[in-house]
């Protein structure tokens, strides 16, 4: 019986906007913008060893998740501004005929970063479209300068962007992204669908901010928290269904019923439903993500 699943090879995505931090951390050459950690998404599933075989995570997820819905964890390394985006809710996605479900996200900054989160004030649809045409959408959005280990919840319908930085991202297992603004770089926009879902109301970023070092974030679909690890201390972590453990500093060791795995920085493990708790030790910091539905 398997308690922990680890990727047997990295699941990396090259992006034109990538910084150089993630490629160095992963020890690879290339413009690595994203690392999909233990991904159950059929578009880019992780390969894991399970029951003596190498399998796609998407093929075995139902067996190891106790009926909970899948989540997706990524590390994102932005060397320049990503496009301004919005994601639909589950209801929106169904109405628009999408194959994926809607998308709720949360971010934790892993170094100094700059984000854009929601509108500074209530915006009319026509005002927004004019700003897109005139390449000045940034003027309408809240810009947030972040230090290391700051967190932001990004509910569906919230216009947002990563401008720079290394980011931990947890989301529902969906790849639906509606690009609404791209600084005139010529990539396709998805305005027709985006206009169906955007929340044009004023957004106060402080209401979406959380301190992952002190508090857990409980979204509609997931819960995340950061834990500091010390060599002299081992803690027991409850596991209802499944969870992700991602090491973001130092190292971590997970153990259950004689099975043990070690995580170095920027490595993740998937804890299966085969154990209702596990022991966590090490030195540094991890982020633990659990499903809520």
Image (tube, rainbow, N blue to C red):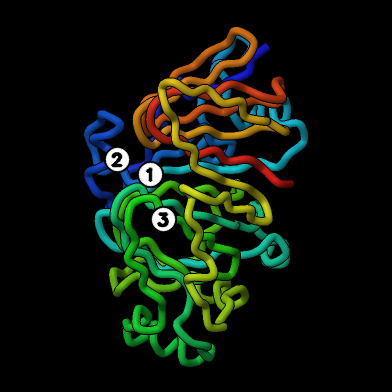
Query: Which numbered dot is residue 150?
Result: 3
Q: Are marks 2 and 3 in contact (CB under 8 Å)?
A: no
Dot 2: what SS? helix
Task: Give the residue pinned by disc 2.
Answer: 22
Front residue of this view, candidates 30 and 147: 147
Residue at left 61%, top 25%?
Answer: 236
Marked residue nearer the N-terminal end (2 or 3): 2
Residue 212 is situated, as x and y percent measured from the top left of the image, at 48, 50
Q: In this picture, is 209 found above or below 65?
A: below
Q: Determine the CA span between mark 2 and mark 3.
A: 18 Å
**Residue 9 visible in the displayed image:** no
Residue 277 is situated, as x and y percent measured from the top left of the image, at 67, 24
Task: Give the residue pinned by disc 1.
Answer: 34
Dot 3: what SS? loop
Q: Determine the CA span between mark 3 and mark 1.
A: 19 Å
Front residue of this view, candidates 50 and 130: 50
Q: Are marks 2 and 1 in contact (CB under 8 Å)?
A: yes
Front residue of this view, candidates 194 and 71: 71
């Amino acid at each position: 019986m398997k308690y922990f699943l680890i990727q047997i090879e990295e699941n990396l995505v090259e992006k034109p906007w990538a910084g150089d931090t993630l490629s160095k951390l992963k020890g690879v050459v290339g413009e690595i913008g994203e690392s999909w950690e233990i991904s159950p998404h059929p578009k880019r599933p992780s390969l894991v060893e399970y029951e003596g075989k190498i399998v796609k995570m998407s093929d075995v997820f139902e067996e190891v998740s106790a009926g909970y819905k899948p989540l997706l964890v990524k590390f994102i390394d932005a060397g320049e501004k990503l496009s301004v985006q919005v994601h639909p809710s589950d209801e929106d996605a169904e109405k628009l005929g999408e194959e994926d479900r809607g998308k709720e996200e949360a971010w934790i900054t892993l170094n100094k970063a700059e984000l854009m989160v929601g509108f500074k004030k209530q915006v009319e649809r026509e005002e927004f479209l004019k700003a897109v045409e005139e390449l000045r959408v940034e003027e309408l959005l809240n810009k947030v300068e972040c230090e290391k280990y700051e967190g932001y919840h990004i509910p569906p319908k919230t216009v947002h962007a990563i401008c720079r930085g290394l980011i931990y991202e947890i989301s529902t297992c969906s790849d639906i992204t509606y690009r609404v603004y791209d600084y005139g770089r010529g990539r396709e926009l998805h305005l027709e669908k985006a206009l169906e879902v955007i929340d044009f109301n004023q957004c106060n970023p402080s209401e979406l901010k959380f301190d992952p070092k002190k508090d857990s974030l409980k979204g509609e679909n997931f819960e995340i928290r950061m834990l500091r690890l010390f060599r002299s201390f081992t803690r027991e972590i409850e596991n209802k269904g499944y969870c992700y453990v991602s090491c973001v500093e130092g190292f971590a060791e997970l153990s259950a019923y004689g099975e043990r795995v070690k995580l170095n920085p920027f490595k993740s493990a998937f804890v299966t439903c085969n154990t209702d708790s596990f022991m966590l030790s090490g030195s540094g910091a991890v982020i633990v993500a659990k499903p809520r539905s």
